[in-house]
Amino acid sequence: MLAHLRQHLVAVLSSAQRVILSTTGPAGLQAAMLPCVADGLLIRLMLPRTSDLLLNIEREPQVLVTSSDWQVWGRARVLDSGARAALINGFNLPDPAWFTLIEVVPARVAVSRHEGWGAAETFDVDAES
């Protein structure tokens, strides 16, 4: 991905603090509004440990993450406890022990129009970006 396009996407993704995560799998279609932090092109989300979203992600890692400014189609993975401990501080949660950290690697990003509806820009993202 070209450096200026990557910088544009990083700026767009960093605007969201809460998003809707949508999954499908054994627990059926699931969606929830969750706190998030963007780190470059990666999106990290905190899920309650008892969430049906986690069951779905374990079986089907393809997810859709939606903010008011963008949508990301990508693959989610649960981060291990070492990565979780290093990254949890950015979320300001009352009791982080009850939450699991997941990371979404984007495959496609659609940036919303500021007026009207639909996407103003759509980007396919390389795994190495």
Image: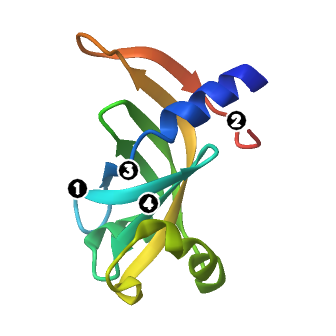
Comparing 16 with 62, the one in front is 16
Mark 2: which secondary structure? loop
Q: Mark 3 or mark 2: which is in front?
A: 3
Q: Which residue is mark 2?
A: 126
As drawn, is 39 to the left or to the right of 96? Answer: right
Of pointers 3 and 4, the one earlier in the residue sequence: 3
As drawn, is 78 to the left or to the right of 31? Answer: right
Mark 4: which secondary structure? loop
Q: Which mark is residue 20?
A: none
Q: Which residue is mark 3?
A: 17
Identity, as a three-letter code, of the amino acid under mark 3: Gln
Q: Mark 1 or mark 2: which is in front?
A: 2
Q: Crowding near pointer 3: few (<14 within 10 Å), some, many (20+)? A: some
Residue 16 picture location, percent across and down: 40, 43
CA gap, disc 3 and disc 4: 25 Å
Of pointers 2 and 4, the one earlier in the residue sequence: 4
Going 22% across and 55% down the picture, which residue do you hit? 29
Where the N terminus falls, by quadrant?
A: top right
Q: Mark 2 or mark 4: which is in front?
A: 2
Q: Which mark is residue 60?
A: 4
CA gap, disc 1 and disc 2: 27 Å
Q: Which residue is mark 1?
A: 29
Identity, as a three-letter code, of the amino acid under mark 4: Glu
Comparing 75 with 114, the one in front is 114
Residue 119 picture location, percent across and down: 37, 17
Q: Quadrant of residue 10?
A: top right
Mark 1: which secondary structure? loop
Identity, as a three-letter code, of the amino acid under mark 1: Leu
